[in-house]
Image (cartoon, helix red, strand yellow):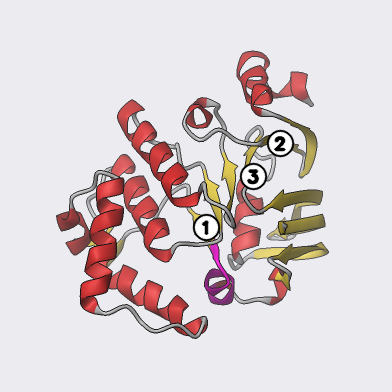
Amino acid sequence: MTMLQIDNLQAEVAGKPILKGLSLTVNAGEIHAIMGPNGAGKSTLGYTLGGRPGYAVTGGSVTFDGRDLLALAPHERAAAGLFLGFQYPVEIPGVSGAQFLREAANAQRKARGEEPLSGGAFLKLAREQAALLRMDMDMLKRPVNVGFSGGEKKRAEMVQMGILDPKFAVLDETDSGLDIDALRIVGEGINAIMRRPGKAVLLITHYQRLLDYVRPDFVHVLAGGRIVRTGGPELALQLEEQGYEAAA
C-alpha cells in the first residue's frame, strides 16, 4: 500500500526555488533514506511535508495515506499520522516535557475521535518509551529540551515519536550531534517504534553511519532539488567512499 506519493514537487523559500520537480513513492513497511550535499533541498523536503510556514509549494502534489497532504494544516498533518523530527529540536522554557507530550498525544487522539489518555495511562506509556530510549523519566519533568545535550534532545524527540505513534516519520538528520552510544540507542529506538507493518520512515541524513543501525530499503540521492539516483543500502556505502559527485 502506498503511504506517501510525491509527484513533481516544487517548493521555494523566500522566493528562491529549492525543490525543482521531486518525485518519490514510499510504501507502508518501508524505510527510505535521503542523502545529498548541503543545499540540495533535504531539509526543505522535510519542512514542506510537515507544513512549516515560509516553505511555499509552487507545483506538484503530495498524497499521504490517500489524502491531499498539502491541503492540510500542520496540526492536521500530525493528527493524520505524520511526524517530523527536527535537525535542531527547539527548547520550550516553562513547559514540562511530560505535560507537553500528554497534551500533544490527547490533541491528536481527539482529532481522530479517540478517547484521551488518562494521567495513569499516559505515565505508563511515557515510562515505556523513555526506557526504550534509556532516558530517565525525571528528564520529562523538566522544561522541553532546556539544558539538554544534543544527544539528549534527539533521544527526547524519539520518546515523543514513540508516544505519538505516527504512521509516517520524517526524520531530519536525527544522527546530528550524536556520539557512538547515543547513535546506537536512537537507531534501536527508531527500529522498535517504526519498523512495523503499516508504518514508514523517511530518513534525511548526510552520512551512512545511522544506516548501520536503521537499514533502509532504498537510498536516494537528492541534488539540485531533485532525486537523481536511487539504490539499495549499498548506495550509501558508495556515497561514503566516493562522494556525491560520483553518484549523481
Tell me residue 51's x, y (percent): 61, 67
- Magenta highlight on residue 134: no
Query: Residue at left 68%, top 60%?
Result: 14
Q: Please state if 105 lies on the left or on the right of 147 as rendered.
A: right
Q: Quadrant of residue 74?
A: bottom right
Compared with 31, 47 (above or below) is below
Residue beneath the point at 55% across and 28% down: 207
Report the span colored magenta. 75-82
Please state which of the two labelled residues, at mark 3 or mark 2, is closer to the viewer.
2
The amino acid at mark 2 is His
Label 3: element kind = helix
- Mark 3 and 2 residues: CB-CB less than 8 Å, in contact? no
The residue wearing badge 2 is 220
Q: If you read the primary sequence from the N terminus, does the residue marked by circle 3 or circle 2 appear first?
A: 3
Left or right: 202, with 103 as reference point: right
Residue 166 position in % (x across, y down): 50, 62
Spatial CA distance of label 1 from label 3 is 13 Å
Element at badge 2? strand
